[in-house]
Amino acid sequence: MSNEYADCIFNRKIMPVIYETPTYFADKNLKSIYNILRKDLAREFGEDKLLFDSPDKVIHKIPQHYKLDDEKAIPVWVPYGRNLSTIIEESLLIRNMAENIDLRRIYVKEDIAGKAKEFIKERIRDMED
């Protein structure tokens, strides 16, 4: 028995990414564009030629909402103001790393990749006009 997905893995057949949103795309316009492209591509090429992926995960496992006295908090010493704080309160970088990745990708089978990329370019051009 043959499995199409196993064949892709064993024979190194890949589905190229033809569209990818920014890592954190909270912008409603970007979400609308993604949803329109997804629907239009499925209508034009068929769902069976496409793969939609969304990792939707946290970059880092640092707890975001713990208070200083919580055992899961990561305390840090700060020389200004109060002397103890949490790493999430003191570091904008780490605070951002504790947010979920909101990324969407559209993959397509190799045999239609060129046509699908051109289709996306045209649709985006149409939306910009």
Image (cartoon, rainbow, N blue to C red):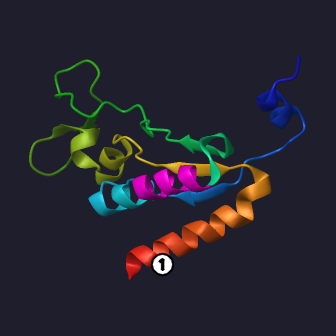
- Which quadrant does the C terminus fall into? bottom left
Q: Mainly helix, strand or loop, the magenta region?
A: helix
Residue ID for mark 1: 125
The vertical placement of 59 against 3, above or below, is below
Q: Quadrant of residue 95?
A: top left
- Magenta stretch holds residue 6: no
Foreground residue among 104 and 109: 109
- Which residues fall within the magenta stretch? 34-44
Q: Residue 52: give x, y in percent of width and height.
A: 55, 43
Residue farthest left in this picture: 81
In the image, residue 110 sits, relative to residue 87, either above or below, namely: below
Question: What kind of residue is marked 1?
Answer: Arg
Q: Position of residue 94 (x, y in %)?
A: 35, 46
**Nearest to the observer: residue 65 or residue 67:** 65
Question: Is residue 37 inside the magenta stretch?
Answer: yes
Q: Position of residue 127 (x, y in %)?
A: 40, 74
Residue 47, picture quadrant: top right
Residue depicted at 71% across the width and 53% down the height:
16
